[in-house]
């Protein structure tokens, strides 16, 4: 079975200084050594957060970012430094870089600005705590304006195509300004071109 998906690839641009936004909801960065913090919060753990916890445990991402209110997880994201589980950015460049994703916002909290807030806080953290300005994220191609990206200085720089074959083999192609082709078997890179 073949599946195709078209994606927009975004990169953080330093057109203006990004100021950290404040919110009444709580947020937390969880690194591998901090995983017990999730248990102490007694959060309702959704499928996405469960997946992120496993990826953090096996060092596929460097930290998890959470926005939560009481026991409810509003937003969760995984972030990689010089690595990515997003196949479009797998070993993407030699210079230090960071990739935000996967991301998930609880449907009960959507259209209330939490995704925009989450991106803002994460970009601020990556720049100030890790001294990295090359920040990337991908999203499925859409006709709607990506306001959360625009206000956080994330500009579309390229496009991507992902082809899934039996949900085991993945071909990821970055095209437009640069061309890259990566072939994966599950999460293992088996061919890189470009």
Image (cartoon, rainbow, N blue to C red):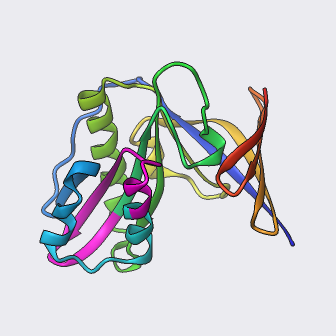
| Residue 154 as seen in the image, left or right of residue 114 | right
Q: Position of residue 45 (x, y in %)?
A: 32, 77
Q: Position of residue 78 (x, y in %)?
A: 41, 53
Question: Measured along the vertical axis of the image, is residue 181 above or below residue 167?
Answer: above
Q: Would residue 2 be seen by someone viewing this image from the given angle?
A: yes
Q: Would residue 31 be seen by someone viewing this image from the given angle?
A: no
Residue positioned most to the front: 58
Q: Which residues are magenta?
A: 54-75
Tell me what residue is drawn at x 29 percent, y 32 percent. 18
Question: Measured along the vertical axis of the image, is residue 127 above or below residue 154?
Answer: above
Tell me what residue is drawn at x 19 percent, y 78 percent. 71
Q: Position of residue 76 (x, y in %)?
A: 35, 62
- Picture mark count: 0
Tell me what residue is drawn at x 65 percent, y 43 percent. 88
Q: Position of residue 175 (x, y in %)?
A: 78, 36
Is 117 or 68 nearer to us in this picture?
A: 68
The quadrant of the image that shows the N terminus is bottom right
Residue positioned most to the right: 1
| Residue 67 as seen in the image, left or right of residue 8 | left
The quadrant of the image that shows the C terminus is top right
């Amino acid at each position: 079975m073949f599946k195709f998906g078209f994606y927009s690839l975004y990169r953080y641009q330093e057109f203006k200084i990004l100021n950290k936004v404040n919110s009444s909801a709580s947020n937390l960065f969880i690194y591998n050594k901090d995983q017990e913090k999730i248990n102490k919060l007694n959060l309702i753990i959704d499928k996405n957060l469960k997946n992120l916890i496993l990826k953090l445990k096996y060092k596929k991402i460097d930290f998890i970012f959470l926005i939560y209110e009481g026991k409810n997880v509003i937003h969760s994201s995984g972030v990689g430094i010089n690595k990515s589980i997003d196949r479009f950015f797998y070993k993407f460049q030699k210079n230090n870089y960071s990739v935000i994703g996967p991301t998930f916002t609880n449907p009960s909290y959507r259209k209330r600005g939490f995704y925009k807030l989450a991106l803002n806080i994460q970009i601020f953290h990556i720049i100030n705590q890790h001294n990295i300005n090359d920040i990337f994220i991908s999203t499925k191609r859409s006709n709607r304006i990506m306001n959360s990206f625009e206000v956080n200085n994330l500009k579309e720089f390229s496009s991507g195509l992902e082809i899934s074959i039996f949900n085991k083999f993945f071909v990821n192609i970055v095209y437009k300004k640069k061309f890259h082709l990566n072939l994966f078997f599950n999460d293992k890179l088996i061919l890189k071109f470009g």
